Amino acid sequence: MTPLLEGVGIALDSLRANKVRAALTILGVAIGVMVVMVIGALISGFDKGLADQLNQLGPKTFWVGRFYSAGVNICDGSDENCPWRHNPQMTLAEAKLIRSLPSVRFVALEEGTGGVEVSYGDRRTSSVNIHGRSADWVEVAGGDVFPGRSYTNVEDQAGDRVVVINAKLADWLFARLDPIDRTIKIGGLPYQVIGVFNPPPSLFGEDEEFDAIIPHGAMTKYVNYWKGWMNFLVGPTGTATTAQAMEDVTTALRISRGLRPRQPNNFSVVSQEQYLTDIASTTMIMRIVMVVLSMVGLMVGGIGVIAIMMISVTERTREIGVRKALGATRREILWQFLVEATTLTLAGGMCGMILGGLVALLIALLTPVPAHVPVSSIAAALAAAAFTGVLFGIYPASRAARLDPVEALRYE
């Protein structure tokens, strides 16, 4: 411990004696570490926010649909890149089949479209997302419907022209008027407003879109939309696991569609865990950018370490000669200068860690992104700083260790 503490003390004395020179060395390392911290905080915040939003669907809920792109959808019209084109669309009969399974509690189905005109009085807009959903949509939407209510299964099956609009559309259409029981037109047909949907907080802040949610039965009867992309959100029962329910749904659909054992599924069943895994793979580019930028900063700091340590070796040549004359070995000299170099880079790492933590805190406070610094980023940043000190400090340390004691004592 004595050589270690001695090396740290000498390095700190060097920092105090050569403030500008040391600051330039520390700056590069600090920037590299700060980049690691900030990008790591953004990625972790994004992952956490996405996981929280998925939990609003229910931790066991999974998705069933015609095609799952896993975050990438490249289609040039060929069977090779678009095999899903041959997948049959999901049907109401299949939704009923899934709902009848003993491991399934509910099936929320949805189709949607845009570009349909919505109007009330002299106010009209076509910038509304029209969602045709089954009555179970409230199980997975998060948020709440208030004032008013959502529609029932009976209203859905009958195709009643009732609608739940989101709070943003309600404010735009009705201003300060009570929206409940008022009649708006969707695609030229009257719909009675029965509720206002207040969505949960969005990952990136307030939702700026207008949304209108109507019974799926009304969607299929009255709205002109692109058919074939109905999907289901399936909720297992309290006693069934997600894996068990997914297996039951997969088996039921394969039997229903007459698939043989060796034939692949012509539908997709995707758990939340799979979705999060796929999203993480799409954010890999951000992680690569983080590594590259931090390496540039650390390299700049490392070059500074070489420069300042070479100057330190030159200034302390006589001291090295005296230490060797008194019995210091090459290993002891090498260790001393490596400790000094590592102390310099760790000082830069600590500064970068503090700055990165402050930037992440400001992002979390001033933006909707729930940025937070994971412990793994802190450990990685400090380890990178220490490694930089060792890597770039080897040459000056080895040069100091190889000095001839007689020549060193003669140095003026």
Image: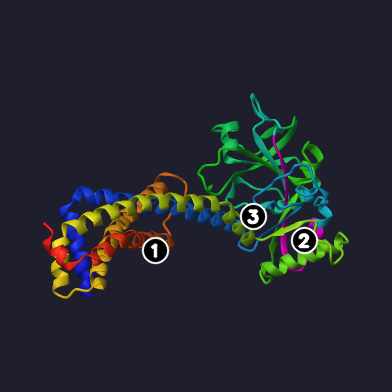
First to last magenta residue range: 95-114
* Residue 47 vertical placement versus 220 (above, below): below
User: How many neighbours does mark 3 have within 10 angstroms: few (below 14), some (14-19), or many (20 or more)?
Assistant: some
Closer to the eye: label 1 or 3: 1
- Which residue is painted at 26% across and 62% down in the image? 399
Q: Position of residue 5 (x, y in %)?
A: 21, 70
Q: Which residue is mark 2?
A: 99
In which quadrant is the N terminus drawn? bottom left
Residue type at the position of mark 1? Ala
Q: Position of residue 264 (x, y in %)?
A: 80, 61
Residue type at the position of mark 2? Arg
Query: From where the camera sits, is residue 116 visible?
Result: yes
1 or 2: tag closer to the N-terminus: 2
Residue type at the position of mark 3? Val
Closer to the eye: label 1 or 2: 1
Q: Which residue is mark 1?
A: 379
Task: Label 2: state its secondary structure.
Answer: helix
In which quadrant is the C terminus drawn? bottom left
Disc number for residue 140? 3
User: How many neighbours does mark 1 have within 10 angstroms: few (below 14), some (14-19), or many (20 or more)?
Assistant: few
Write down the quadrant of residue 62 in the picture.
bottom right
Write down the quadrant of residue 408 in the picture.
bottom left
